[in-house]
Image (spheres, rainbow, N blue to C red):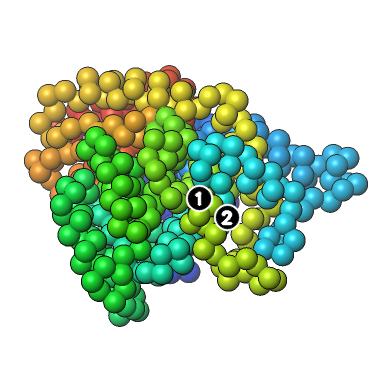
Amino acid sequence: MTSRETNLAFLERLMSLECQDATYPVAPEANPLVFESASGSVIRDVEGREYVDLCAGFGALALGHNHPVVREVFARLSSGAFASTVPPIVHGMGDVYPSRAKVELIEELRSLMPERLCRVSLSISGGQAVEVALKTAMLSTGHAGFISFKDGYHGVDLGVLPVTSRRDFKDPFKKYLGERVAIELPYGCGEELLADAIETLKSSPCGFAGIIAEPVQGRGGVINPPANWLAMIAGLAHKSGGVLILDEILTGLGRRGKWTEAESVDADLVCFGKALGGGMPLSACVGTEKVMSAWPKSTGEAIHTGTFFGHPLSCAIAAASLREMKRIDICAMARETGAWLYEQLRIKFAGDPTVEEIRWGGGLMIAIKFNESAGPAPGAVAMDRLRAHGIIALASGAGGTSLSLTPALVIPRDLLTCAIESFQTFRAQRN
């Protein structure tokens, strides 16, 4: 390897060894990109080019890349007198011997939650947090049937595939999904349709365990539900003996300008990930005492565990990140910057015949929805072409019809202004 090796050369090396389904394929003419380093909201590739990051690791980096509080944790654990006299714990046995970092993270996360959400279970990925939520609902109700929604995304682990919408993720594994039932309804559907689906599940062998929903569908293209819809489905779930699971892997912890939608919606279980870890792989399911007490009390062997659950280094970085997010009032920052960016994009794309609408999920969660005149998979095309203009964004929506923007919640407005100008250049070339 030399410093002159190109993005394409690195990708070719990867493709020769990695599972062919793992990494997004980029043709040489579509501006290949391999990350080398990053700081704040700027990423550099292996060729030394810089990009404004409007994706932030699928929304995971609320504080941006390599924030000082994260670097301070690494520095404290790896150098100086502390490391030489008290070697740091970077791995533990979280379900047997917890670390101080795990305890402090759970306390920090709990402090951001409504009073009723008082029990926490840590995992590594968002899909695993949803898995915990589904298992909890099954234990609590004694049933295994769920209602989920079209264009919903809850992960691709085998246990959560029944409630993830996309057929291309589910169909290859249909034969392994067993007898569990998930009825998929339109997102934002009416109470009558929901009630009918609940009755169908209640009359089936699996019964009705609960409803799982995203407060705003992120991967679906930033789709908002009707006003008071989440409160309605919570009430209906409870009336029917089930639970409501809010999947806030993407939307929670400041992304929408609030810590959690459960501040105003009576959810029983809430799943967090992405921003929780401060860049480290970490997730959590937070629930009420009543629902979480359905798990048996551990007598020496947890029935749901993992080697890296409560990983001390990840917990230390996550706790430091949450404290910093509280200190700077990141929710207010997301609301203010998001409102400004939404209005700027509405102005810039006004009159564009290929743009159907600019969608705002609140906070810093925005999508540009293209219409049919923009051609096939316009969001994916835009994502590829914007790389040539130094912008990293992400395609979303069924068939890649949208371009989603989920930048760091602390991104400076001058970088966003530069990105908007690059959008204008791309738009002019496209038209």
Q: Residue at x 72, y 64 (%)?
A: 96
Query: Residue 342's x, y, as percent?
Result: 29, 25
Secondary structure beneath dot 1 equals strand
Q: Residue at x 54, y 65 (%)?
A: 295
Could you say which quadrant of the image residue 134 lies in?
A: bottom left
Counting residues from the start of the chain, the first of labels 2 and 1 encountered is 2
The residue labelled by disc 2 is 122
**Number of numbered discs:** 2
Q: Which mark is residue 288?
A: 1
Q: Amino acid at mark 2?
A: Leu
Query: Residue 296's x, y, as percent?
Result: 58, 67
Q: Residue at x 22, y 49 (%)?
A: 187
Please give left or right for residue 402 compared with residue 408 in the image: left
In the displayed structure, would residue 32 be above or below residue 124?
above
Secondary structure beneath dot 2 equals strand
| 423 or 3, nearer to the observer | 423
The quarter of the image holding the C terminus is top left
User: Could you tell me how far apart the alpha carbons at marks 2 and 1 are, in whole angstroms?
Assistant: 15 Å
| 84 or 390, nearer to the observer | 84
Q: Amino acid at mark 1?
A: Thr
Q: Residue at x 28, y 32 (%)?
A: 360
The quarter of the image holding the N terminus is bottom right
Foreground label between 2 and 1: 1
In the displayed structure, would residue 172 be above or below residue 249?
below
Please give left or right for residue 14 compared with residue 76 in the image: left
